[in-house]
Image: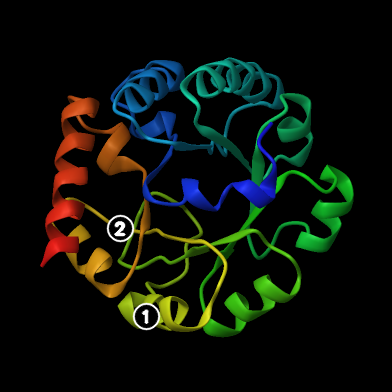
Amino acid sequence: MLHRHTCREYFQGIYALTSFEHSQGRSNLEVVREILAAGVKIIQYREKEASKRHKYQECLEIRHLTRRAGALFIVNDDVDIALAVQADGVHVGQDDLPVEVVRRLVGPDMIIGLSTHSPQQARSAVECGADYIGVGPIFATSTKKDVCAPVGLEYLKYVVEHINIPFVAIGGIKEHNIARVVQTGACCIAMVTEIVGAPDIQKKIAALKAAMERARSQ
């Protein structure tokens, strides 16, 4: 497991999340293999509907894959599964266990990420000891059922200028609008359907990386 104090360098480029529902019939393991083969260095396992046993088994496999690839492995919500498979981190939302409680459960080394939707939540995340924050949803998204309204690029701009822990822009980000997110200052961008729903995942990731590179150089 990677120590949380050495993880900052990973928060560059693409942060990929699983979603079996949007993976065109492919298993999460098939999708993760393709994502890792394309050089992505952060994978988050996010499955809301599956049973605990199923999630545990998939996470165990993905932990092996990410370890071999030298990638960070983050588990969404399920602190117990993150601990059981020795994930590098756990990601929680505003309605989940508070970060301070998660820290007591996982110990001093595991990375804790927190979803945020406003400047106040971002400042609070820093105060309570989150290692990184999710910033979004930047644009409208239908991937999550209970998602809040888009926060837009203004909130991202606030985080770029005022928050000193790593952050990940997320929500409705696609190849056609990724340049706007990069030009606002995001170094790390999370995507779900744009990646897992692509017919050729490695080709899509290469196109996304190229779009990010072009945006940085403009």
Q: Which residue is mark 1?
A: 157
Secondary structure category for the residue under label 1: helix
Q: Quadrant of residue 73?
A: top right
Q: In the drawing, does residue 200 fall left or right of residue 49?
A: left
- Residue 187 vs 21, above or below: the answer is below
Q: Amino acid at mark 2?
A: Gly
The answer to whether residue 144 is visible is: yes
Q: In the rendering, at what x and y percent does residue 53 appear?
A: 70, 20
Q: Residue at x 32, y 71 (%)?
A: 185
Q: In the rendering, at what x and y percent does residue 99 appear?
A: 76, 61
- Pointers 2 and 1 in contact (CB under 8 A)? no
Q: Which residue is mark 2?
A: 172
Q: Residue at x 37, y 35 (%)?
A: 40
Which is more toward the observer, 95 or 119? Answer: 119
Q: In the rendering, at what x and y percent does residue 49 appear?
A: 57, 34
Q: In the drawing, does residue 104 fall left or right of residue 136?
A: right
